Amino acid sequence: NTRPSSSRLSSEGEEREDARDGAQLVLEQLDGMNVTLGETGDQKDERAKRRQLLEVLDELVTSESNYCDDLGHICDLFLVPLAAELDSATHATVFSNLKQIQQLHVQLAATLDLSAQPEGGTLGDKAEHIAAAFTSLLPFFKMYSTYAANFVAVAPALRALRERRGPHEIINAGEAQSGSVSLEALLFRPVQRM
């Protein structure tokens, strides 16, 4: 019997169809490469600059979101729990105006989140929205000068707190939840951010 079985015919047909699909895919990729190859040097440079600008804008929005999360973490794990253990002067020495800085960045992150993907907007629109988000809050960034000026007193205050049982336990628990990052290191992040 020289006649091929129907299952063999079926698999050969499927192989031919797969080959046609693969060939079509290769042709589409070649067309895309021809468009790219047909670009002038200036067009390639412009495309690379646009891609780089998009990466910078995305990194700016992402890093602001992460920083805002860090500030919330510090407030939730340390600032709020230690408020019950410390007198107001000691609490202010350690945390200064961190809560206000956190609120500023919550507002900035929310504005950036809304402007990160403007509906139907261009890359230029995205850049303008991000710049406007920072510019609108610019006067409030002056509060960093207060935080930085007060930061010199943080280390001695934390050493004294670690000698007291209640604050020591809160700090240790918070640091454990922070991946063993010290409270002093966490409190330095706003100084670094400037």
Image (cartoon, rainbow, N blue to C red):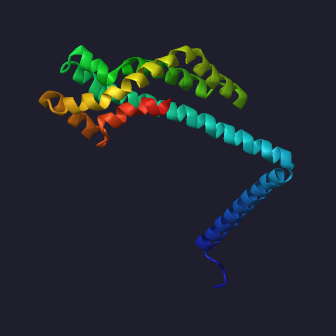
Please tell me whether residue 25 is drawn above or below residue 76 in the rendered image: below
Would you say 165 lies left or right of 47 here?
A: left
Whether residue 170 can be seen here: no
Which residue is found at the position 43% from the left and 25% from the top?
Answer: 148
Farthest residue, direction left: 165
Corner quadrant of residue 111: top right
Which residue is found at the position 66% from the left and 70% from the top?
Answer: 12
Whether residue 166 can be seen here: yes
Would you say 100 lies left or right of 140 here?
A: left
Which residue is found at the position 34% from the left and 30% from the top?
Answer: 73
Measuring from the top left, give residue 82's x and y in whole percent: 23, 23
Q: How many marks?
A: 0
Depth check: 19 or 160 in front? 160
Would you say 35 lies left or right of 106 here?
A: right
Measuring from the top left, give residue 180's x and y in whole percent: 29, 43
Screen quadrant of the N terminus: bottom right
Measuring from the top left, give residue 93's x and y in whole percent: 30, 21
Depth check: 26 or 151 in front? 151
Please tell me whether residue 62 is drawn above or below residue 130 in the rendered image: below
Which residue is found at the position 76% from the left and 43% from the top?
Answer: 47
Corner quadrant of residue 153: top left
Please tell me whether residue 121 is drawn above or below residue 139 in the rendered image: below
Depth check: 8 or 117 in front? 117
Farthest residue, direction bottom: 1
Measuring from the top left, give residue 146's x and y in whole percent: 43, 19
